[in-house]
Image (cartoon, coloured by chain):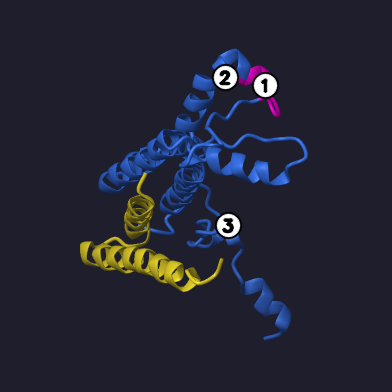
Amino acid sequence: MTAGDSRLRKKKPAETAENQPSVEDRHAPVRLLLGAWFLPGLGHFLLGKKKRAVVFAVVIFCAFITGVLLDGEIGTPKPDSPFSWLAAFACLGNGALAIARLVWLNGLGGLLGGLPFGLEGGGNPSAAGFAYGNTFLYTAGLMNLLAVLDVSDIARGEKS
Amino acid sequence: MDHLLLMIWHALLVSVFFAFLWRSTAAGRRNLFLKTFLIMVVGAAALGWLMYPFP
């Protein structure tokens, strides 16, 4: 048997029984990920992980509310401040909570018209809890983003 | 505003989150929660104590 015969005997991918995409090639539904981002805990709830969903929702909500009560600022992009984009990314991780807070501070018209540099993030830099509040807000957003990644892993079958 | 209380509250929230994110059994979650919570609280107190002599 020559090497050419050996190549011919190999089955094409479509003929094999294992033509299912591997875990790395599978994609989680975009709507599921958007829902998980928008409402903390929703992604896990929809995947049947109800206990985890409740815990994540409560933890992220508590961290966000603590941040707001401590006069923390929702991160918004500022010109000449590249790090403000990172703060905005972290805070936007809170999904509906961050958007609701921005609407509360700017109004819906102000929110849409103020993008990207005209947004008011609230907070009081002279307050004793300002830095602590920011930390809680960033932490809540980043935890929610980690939860979204967890939803993706579960939906793709990589994690139970 | 009690800074120590805020730190403990932050550590509590983060520890609970990661315990449920990374472990799926009750025992595993409890162990990870206790480990991360104690590391954060005791570690921060120890770091603060070590930094005390510095201006």
Question: Label 2: how many residues lie within 10 Å, few (<14), some (14-19) or many (20+)?
Answer: some
Residue identifier under label 2: A106
Which numbered disc flags the more N-terminal residue, 2 or 1? 2
Q: Nearer the viewer, residue B34 or A6?
A: B34
Question: Label 3: how many residues lie within 10 Å, few (<14), some (14-19) or many (20+)?
Answer: few
Question: Label 1: how many residues lie within 10 Å, few (<14), some (14-19) or many (20+)?
Answer: few
Residue extent of the magenta highlight: A111-118
Chain under label 1? A
Please name the residue shown 21% across and 62% down the image: B26
Helix, strand or loop at label 3? It is helix
Determine contact: label 3, label 2, CB under 8 Å: no
Residue identifier under label 3: A14
- Report the disc number at residue A114: 1
Please name the residue shown 63% across and 45% down the image: A86
Question: Quick one: which residue is furthest to the left in this view?
Answer: B26
- Report the disc number at residue A103: none
* Chain with colour blue in the figure: A
Which numbered disc flags the more N-terminal residue, 3 or 2? 3
